[in-house]
């Protein structure tokens, strides 16, 4: 398209908008207070600027356009679509959105990278996020997942330090591989996570071709209150595909929003991406006999031990119309649960319930769930009132305290029959899992990419940390360790 208009929908947004307004304009320009703007107010030179209300309106608003970005997963793209049940899982989970085959539920999805800020190039290698909000008839259910099957740490006390270690150095303001690899090599539980981070899975070929693992083992219950324990996994119907580091580096320069554009253009062109949804299902007996802590988020549940059961799929068929309103303000929380899904019993999950809510209060305000894209589809009655906008109808004239004698909202009779189980966790590492279960599931190309990427990342890293990395890989796979040494020597 060098010699003509670009065929990419992402380049045509303005033209498409203009074509949709045949009358030439969407209407009269007004102040935010509604008063029509006079044409002379749109010219500032040699005017009394301070009395120019159009100028005042736009300049003061401009300075307030930015809100705090997510302190992790700052760069992201979103899309909308639906989830459809394909297999009966009512035997394990009574959540209404799963109640019958063929039932559909609207979803919002946000794809992200972890460590970069809002302007980071999409193809910078990183763990990827895929968060799904199911707008169910019993409230919103959020699954906030990653493209690694295991997380980096299991003790939430370490989370703030982990985030500091992967973000910018406080002095140079540059992301520093010394801090990232220092932290990672000091924690024995993160070996599964390291395999994804340093393989080409950290540079997915597109968001459409990316795994998503909710990781935590959730407790769910059926209508009779019988508990089961499940991991939620989503596999892309196009298959998982990566790009290599040099392609990613080229695109980071040529088209920093490459993955965002790919998602937008494909959906606009009707190539709707879809994912098949799977559950790994464990009984309480399976939990006891697994031979390891199935609630440990640094561990995978090997598929040969706990097979994947398909139960649904989701399809993304709609781009956002307004990115800020619908994606920047989209707020996911592991604490958004629905009847039948109790959450996970591990400490990390408890920390996440608190932390996402806290982040939303800071980033979007206490009325976060009144922002249109976060509003549940079902009727909502609360005793929450006032605060920063949006308050919407602020629950009108209904009583604002509970209990009350004046027909305010009442809780229903307890519906949840099982109790979230209590787990005690230890601090062990997971090198055997990385060696025996996870690495063998990587394709030969993905395995080859690990030493190549690591050697590149390790260029500026001090010797004692390099030594630790090599020692770790000598246990996971001596071939990878050998390759790292060779490639470091070649540099
Ligand atoms: C102690 C552990 C963790 C804490 C405290 C934590 C906290 C947070 C917070 C506060 C945000 C920003 C939320 C916002 O501003 O809207 C976030 C984003 C995110 N986190 Fe975590 N997180 C933790 C672990 C995890 C784990 C285990 C996963 C995946 C299994 C995960 C996946 C994500 C994703 C995908 C996002 C981006 C959500 C979006 O697209 O808006 N995090 N995390």
Image (cartoon, rainbow, N blue to C red):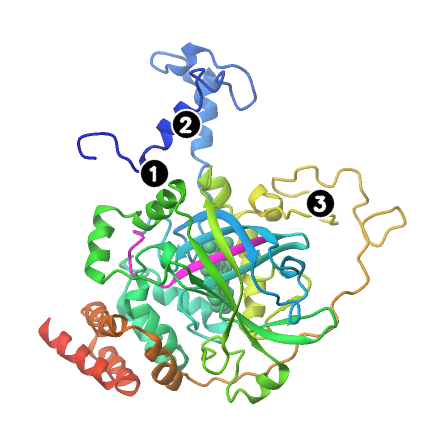
Marks 1/2: CA–CA distance: 12 Å
Percent coordinates x, y for residue 352 in the rendering: 54, 65
Percent coordinates x, y for residue 257 in the rendering: 31, 47
Bin the neighbour count of mark 1 within 10 Å (Cα to Cα): few under 14, some 14-19, many 20 and up.
some
Left or right of 414, for residue 276 = left
Q: Residue at x 51, y 20 (%)?
A: 31
Image quadrant in which the N terminus is located: top left
Q: Which mark is residue 18?
A: none
Left or right of 471, for residue 291 = right
Q: Which mark is residue 10?
A: 1
Q: Which mark is residue 385?
A: 3
Are circles 1 and 2 on residues that touch, CB within 8 Å?
no
Image height of 373 relative to 59, above or below: below
Residue at numbered disc 2: 17
Query: Which is nearer the N-term, disc 2 or disc 3?
Result: 2
Q: Residue furthest right?
A: 405
Percent coordinates x, y for residue 387 in the rendering: 65, 43
Q: Is residue 86 visible?
A: yes
Left or right of 197, for residue 233 = right
Q: Is residue 179 visible?
A: no
Q: Quadrant of residue 473?
A: bottom left
Percent coordinates x, y for residue 339 in the rendering: 69, 62
Marks 2/3: CA–CA distance: 38 Å
Q: Examine the structure image and report whether residue 353 is included in the region drawn in magenta.
A: no
SS for tag 1? helix
The residue range painted magenta reads 121-134
Are circles 2 and 3 on residues that touch, CB within 8 Å?
no
Ligand 1 within 8 A of label 1's CB?
A: no
Ligand 1 within 8 A of label 3's CB?
A: no
Bin the neighbour count of mark 2 within 10 Å (Cα to Cα): few under 14, some 14-19, many 20 and up.
few
Marks 3/1: CA–CA distance: 40 Å
């Amino acid at each position: 398209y060098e010699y003509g208009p670009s065929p990419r929908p992402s380049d045509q947004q303005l033209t498409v908008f203009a074509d949709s307004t045949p009358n030439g304009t969407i209407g009269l320009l007004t102040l935010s207070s509604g008063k029509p703007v006079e044409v002379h107010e749109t010219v500032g030179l040699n005017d009394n600027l301070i009395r120019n209300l159009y100028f005042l309106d736009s300049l003061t608003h401009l300075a307030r356009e930015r809100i705090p970005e997510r302190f992790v997963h700052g760069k992201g793209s979103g899309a909308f679509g639906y989830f459809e049940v394909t297999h009966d899982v009512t035997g394990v989970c009574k959540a209404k959105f799963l109640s019958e085959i063929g039932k559909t539920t609207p979803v919002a999805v946000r794809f992200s990278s972890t460590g970069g800020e809002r302007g980071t190039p999409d193809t910078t290698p990183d763990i990827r996020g895929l968060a799904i909000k199911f707008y169910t008839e019993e409230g919103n259910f959020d699954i906030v997942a990653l493209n690694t099957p295991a997380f980096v740490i299991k003790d939430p006390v370490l989370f703030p330090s982990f985030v500091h270690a992967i973000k910018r150095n406080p002095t140079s303001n540059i992301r520093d591989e010394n801090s990232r690899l220092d932290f990672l090599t000091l924690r024995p539980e993160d070996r599964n996570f390291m395999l994804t981070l340093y393989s080409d899975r950290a540079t997915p070929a597109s968001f459409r071709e990316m795994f998503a693992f909710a990781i935590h083992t959730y407790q769910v219950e059926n209508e009779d209150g019988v508990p089961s324990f499940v991991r939620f996994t989503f596999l892309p119907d196009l298959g998982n595909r990566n790009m290599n580091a040099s392609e990613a580096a080229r695109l980071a320069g040529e088209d920093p929003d490459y993955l965002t554009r790919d998602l937008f253009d494909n959906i606009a062109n009707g190539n709707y991406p879809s994912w098949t949804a799977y559950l790994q299902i464990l009984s309480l007996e399976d939990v006891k006999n697994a031979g390891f802590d199935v609630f440990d988020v640094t561990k995978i549940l090997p598929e040969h031990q706990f097979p994947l059961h398909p139960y649904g799929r989701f399809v993304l068929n709609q781009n956002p119309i307004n990115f800020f309103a619908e994606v920047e303000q989209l707020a996911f929380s592991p604490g958004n649960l629905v009847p039948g899904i109790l959450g996970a019993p591990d400490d990390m999950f408890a920390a996440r319930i608190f932390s996402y809510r806290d982040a939303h209060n800071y980033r979007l305000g206490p009325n976060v769930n009144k922002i249109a894209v976060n509003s549940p589809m079902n009727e909502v009655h609360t005793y929450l009132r006032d605060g920063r906008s949006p308050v919407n109808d602020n629950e009108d004239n209904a009583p604002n305290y509970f209990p009350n004698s004046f027909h305010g909202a009442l809780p229903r009779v307890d519906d949840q029959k099982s109790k979230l189980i209590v787990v005690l966790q230890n601090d062990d590492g997971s090198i055997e899992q990385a060696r025996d279960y996870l690495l063998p599931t990587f394709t030969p190309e993905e395995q080859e990419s690990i030493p190549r990427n690591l050697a590149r990342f390790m260029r500026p890293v001090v010797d004692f940390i390099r030594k630790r990395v090599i020692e770790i890989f000598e246990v996971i796979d001596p071939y990878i360790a050998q390759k790292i040494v060779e490639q470091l020597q070649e540099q």
